[in-house]
Image: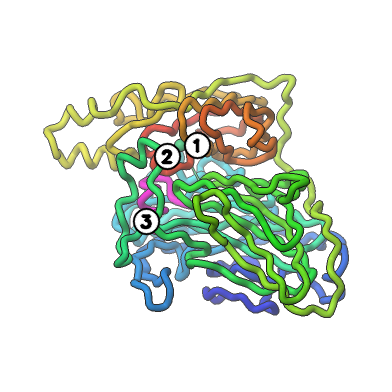
Amino acid sequence: MSGGAAQGLSRRAVVAGAVAGLAGWGWPRHGGSAAERTGPTPIAAPRDPVTHDIAFLARERPTRILGADGPTVPLWSYAETPFPILRARVGDRIRATLENGLAEHTSIHWHGIRLPNAMDGVQHVTQSPVGPGERFTYDFTVPDTGSFFFHPHCNESGQVGHGLAGLLIVEGDERRRPDAELVLAVKDWRLDEAGRFLPFVTAAGASRAGSFGTVRSVNGKRRESFEAPAGALVRVRLYNLDATRVLDVGATGGPAAVIAADGTRIDPVPLDRTGRETWRLGPGMRADILLRMPAAGRTVELVDYRGAELWTIATLTAVKSGTPPRRFDPDILLPARYPAPDLGKAERLPFVFQAASASIAAFEAEFPPGDPLAAMLLDSLCVGGEAYWSINKSSWPTGDHRALPPPLAELVTGKSYVFELTNATPHPHPVHLHGHIFRVVASSSAEQPLVAGDTVLLGPRDRTEIAFVAAPGAWMLHCHVLEHLETGMMGWLRVA
Ligand code: C2O
Ligand code: CU
């Protein structure tokens, strides 16, 4: 499959098993004829699961991301284009070999997908780091549909900051087909004017809301624009891949509704005055939005309303089509398949996200100042030099830092849990649980929709409850502001 951005209307989306470049646009691959696309269509015929054999080579690939005459930026990526898309169908097997062409160790964590713990890609916890020149093969079956992604799990602010991330889209959730699909991955870059990377971690950022990027981008570009047939239904898979930034996404110019949160079906929520006018996405979170194109010549815009200045994520222009407009009924997805927690029997566990009580300066004090061994040990444990944050008063890592800290909690496989998450800070924290899909069952904030997901945004001082059925393994629980998880706001759960 070619890696270039393909935006032609006639382009078919990625063939099973291939890795595409960040091709935003494509007819769903089970597309059918134009006539079939004008009305509700039956569920696509199930097919036998297939195995997707993928090779990723993580390395530096200098890329122009600031326009044709801009500087070349030393991006890190898994494939020839940034943010490759791996598409599978629910039930398929993924066999992805990571080859490390970087000068530091890495891994691939599959964010949001339920998988065997040994495939979760967390250095020192579920696997040994993949050193420079080494390989590791991830092999798992995808049990859920949705919009997932993948990224390394050590020096995340640096590796993801350089661009190392990809998207995993698992198809098979459409009861009725939209006419087209658009993938939008939003991420800021920390670049100076010459196109050099700025430090990814700053004390001021890490100890507060995080260090913001200097250049906004979508799909690695400054802006995206597309054309789609007038009256067509378009499914947008919107990813917040940023390390820091919270988005408030709205749509103008046509009816639109959020149909999935973190890839999992929700009861559709209109993005207008009858529902929510905007949808909030913390770092690591995704929303699938269904929208209908207006009359030919008009546009739909997806806009981030959160910043002081509005930012247009993408513009879709309607072009003439030979078919009448589709009816706007956003309830197009099949029910999700993740195990439903039993709220009556669930055990409740509190988790308080707050500033660190102790710093790891004590650890560094064991070594002469500037001792490379101290730096090496810190690096090998995937921690920063400072601990600003904690979960239940424990900062990652704790104790003598040379071994895995004790788990935040011990859970039992198959049992239901309610986690009471309290944000005792004045900053937002998107809290991510590995290897599970949870339901948000209560929140002190009216801002917090009670939906499914793998990452939940805790606003300042919020108290939010999530419920799930525990799967076996060692699973990380952390804030997805990358500087926060690297400065203490991370822990793990042991599920036996
Ligand atoms: Cu996307 Cu542990 O993270
Ligand atoms: Cu945080």
Amino acid residing under circle 2: Ala
The residue at label 1 has a CB less than 8 Å from ligand 2: yes
Q: Residues within 10 Å of mark 3 (few under 14, many from 20)?
A: some
Q: CA distance from mark 1 to mark 2?
A: 7 Å
Q: Secondary structure at mark 1?
A: loop
- The quadrant of the picture occupied by the C terminus is top right
Q: Which residue is mark 3?
A: 190
Q: Nearer the viewer, residue 81 or 386?
A: 386
Residue at (29, 27) in percent of width and height = 359
The answer to if 199 sits in the magenta stretch is no
- Residue 182, position in %: x, y? 65, 65
Q: CA distance from mark 3 to mark 1?
A: 20 Å
Read off the magenta span: 151-162
Q: Which residue is mark 2?
A: 209
Q: Nearer the viewer, residue 365 or 88?
A: 365
Q: Nearer the viewer, residue 23 or 311?
A: 311
- The quadrant of the picture occupied by the N terminus is bottom right
Residue at (39, 27) in percent of width and height = 355
Can see residue 119? no
Q: Secondary structure at mark 3?
A: loop
- Residue 273, position in %: x, y? 74, 47
The answer to if 157 sits in the magenta stretch is yes
- Residue 491, position in %: x, y? 45, 31
Amino acid residing under circle 1: Pro
Would residue 412 be found to the left or right of residue 344 on screen? left
Above or below for 241 versus 202:
below
Above or below for 112 versus 401:
below
Would residue 276 be found to the left or right of residue 363 on screen? right
